[in-house]
Structure formats: C-alpha cells, structure tokens
Image (tube, rainbow, N blue to C red):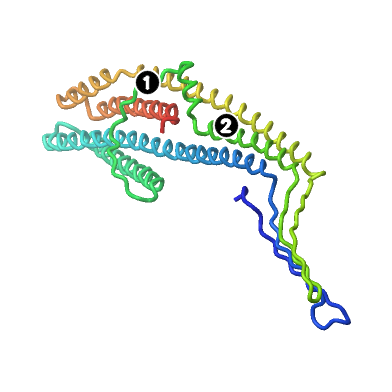
Amino acid sequence: ATNSLGATSIDYSPFYAKEVKGVASSEFIVKQDFDFPTLYAARSQATKASTKSKEWEYKSMRQEILLNALQLCLDLVHMNKQITLMTERYNAALSLSALYEKKMEQGATTILEMNRIKMEMMQTAARIEQLKAEQKTLEHSLQALNGDKPIELDCTSYPQWSEFYADTTFFANYMAHDATLKRMETQTEVSKRHIAVSRQEKLPKLSVGYRRNTSMENASNGFLVGAAIPLFTGKQKIKEAKARHEGMKLQLEDTQVQTLNELKKISYNAASTKRTMNAYNLNVIIEAKNALDKAIKNGSITAVEYFRESDNINENLSEYMKVENKYYKLLAEMQKFTL
C-alpha cells in the first residue's frame, strides 16, 4: 500500500475571451507522479522487514495465549487433586458416621463424638462444593480462550516434563527463540531500513505526462516532464529515522536484560520450589494416614483425636499440592518459547 505509484491526475482548463463565443482555448493534462526508482527498492526491503515483525508479533501473542491456557490446565490438575482429597476425607467421615451410630446404639460413645463427625461431614461437603465452583470457573476461562468452544481434557495429573537446568546453554536457547524478543529485533531492523528509505526520499520526485493545448481551430500536443526536489524536508526525516532506530536499539537491549533476569529468577524459583517439594515425604504422610485410620477403627483413639490428627495430615498434603502446582507452573513459563 505504501510502495505503489501515486494517483494519476487529469486536468482540463477551458479559457474564455470576450470576442469569442464559447471556449476560446483549452488545456488538457494527464500526469503521473512517481518516486525515484531506488526509493521503491528501499521501501520494499523495509516492507519485508515489517512483515517479519508482524509475523513475530503474531507468534508472541500466540505464545502468551498458549501459556495462559497451559497454566489454566495446571490449575485444573491442582483443583482436581484438591477435590479428590476432600472427597476421600468426606467418605472417611461418612464411614465413621455409620460406625459411631452403632456405637451410640450400644452406648459406647457420646453425642459429642457423633456431633464432631457430623460437623466434619458438613464442613467437608461445603469445601467440596466451593472447589467445584472454582473448577467450573477455570473451565470457563479455558473455554473462553478456545473461542468459547468446549474442551474435553483429562486434567487429573501433571504432564511428564523433564526438568529444566538453568545453565548458559538453556538461557541462550530461550533468548534466541523467544517470540517477544524476535519481534523487537525485527522492529529494530525495520527502523534501520527506514533510515535508508529516508535517505532515498531526498532524491527528486519525478512526473511525466501528456499535454494538449487548443486555441480556436489549432491544437498542439506534447509531453510533460517534471521533478520535485525536497530541499528542506529530507535532512530532518533522516535525523528522525536515526533517532527512532537508536531508541529501538536501546529498548531492545533493555528488554533483553529484563528478559534474562526474569528467566534467571524463574529458574531459581523453580529450583527452590523443587527442593521444597522434596522436603515433603509423601510416604511418611501416607503411612501416618493409614495408621490413623486403623487406630480409629480399633477404637484406640476418639473421633475428636482422629480429626485433629487428620487435619494435620491433610494440611500437609494440601500444602504439598500447592507447592507442586507452583513448580509445574514455573516449568511452564520456562518452556514458553517452545509453545
């Protein structure tokens, strides 16, 4: 659109005189203006660079959307695990309720124990409904990213990703393929190409055309050739283009530094979160939970003691799940450039 010939102009001028009835003479001009030929080549190069910039802008937006969708899926995995944990807790309270009803009939327990179990069932059921509502919100958000089309996904377990090692090679690979940085690199190239365009715009603008003059019964035909020389505007445009290019270079350098520092921070947080995950011994938690279930069935502990210890176990499991979710979301950010 910016590298084509301008509009063709057509002018017709009739002239009148007192002693002549009608048109005494006339002038007809058809003229085409065009830039100096080398300017079209410079614009073509700038256009190609601009096209690449738009392609990287699209890829950058695509990566952001896919990362957002991926993190929503990871949150759904976390939410489903929380619902499973709460459902298991509700089923355990339901089994205890049946057990203690028999004990109540036999006079082997008190109403306080029975009420504690009912309170646990009520709180757990409410928590499950709350989690399901949050789950639906995540699903709707994910569906909105998909053009409001339903998505069938099995978000019950985290993907089997290999760990990312934060070394120089990984950082260099990320920086070389990050769409946002590539977009800014191409924008810097576009600004550089515009310097060449501005220099070419100092050259004369040309025009050619056809001209016909009539006077009474006589007519003459000829060609029109002209040139417009930008004596006062070209120099300022070059300065402007150079300033814009320097600004883009500084912005690119600043973004590169910020991106690298942010990547290092994410990789450090991922390594730290992984160590926190390893601090949780899931086997110990599971063994403690099984031992607690046996103790309540054997009558070694009361329902109040059971739920007090169960709260501690479930709290540890819930905290582990939060840390696990954070770790996988950090890994997702580290592999954004592959999306």
Q: Residue 35: where, in percent of width, then height? A: 69, 47
Label 1 neighbour load within 10 Å: few <14, some 14-19, many 20+:
few
Quick check: 99 left or right of 151? left
The relative height of residue 214 versus residue 318 in the rendered view (above or below) is below
Mark 1 residue element:
loop
* Picture coordinates of residue 8, whole percent (x, y): 67, 59
**Viewer-closest of 125 and 223:** 223
> On the image, which quarter does residue 209 sit in?
bottom right
Characterize the local packing of mark 2: few (<14), some (14-19) or many (20 or more) Cα atoms within 10 angstroms.
some
Going by the numbered disc 2, the residue's amino acid type is: Glu
The residue most toward the front is 218
Residue 9 or residue 176, whichever sits in front: 9
Amino acid type, residue under disc 1 in the picture: Glu
Task: Look at the image and tell me in which quarter the C terminus lies.
Answer: top left
Give percent across and percent down for residue 230: 79, 45
- The structure residue drawn at horizontal position 21% and vertical position 36%, both measured from the top left corner, is 91
Residue highlighted by disc 1: 163
Compute the Cα span from label 2 to label 1: 29 Å
| Mark 2 lies on residue | 185
Numbered circles on residues, count:
2
Side of 118 where 15 appears, left or right? right
Q: Is residue 138 above or below residue 319?
A: below
Q: Residue at x 57, y 26 (%)?
A: 256
Question: In the image, residue 21 lies at what x, y percent?
Answer: 82, 83
Q: Secondary structure at mark 2?
A: helix
103 or 231: which is nearer to us?
231
Does 194 appear above or below 323? below
Are the residues at dot 2 and dot 1 in contact (C-beta closer than 8 Å)?
no
Q: In the depicted view, which residue is nearer to us: 128 or 74?
A: 74
Asked if residue 261 is positioned above or below residue 51 in the image, the reply reads above
Q: Determine the image quadrant of residue 238.
A: top right
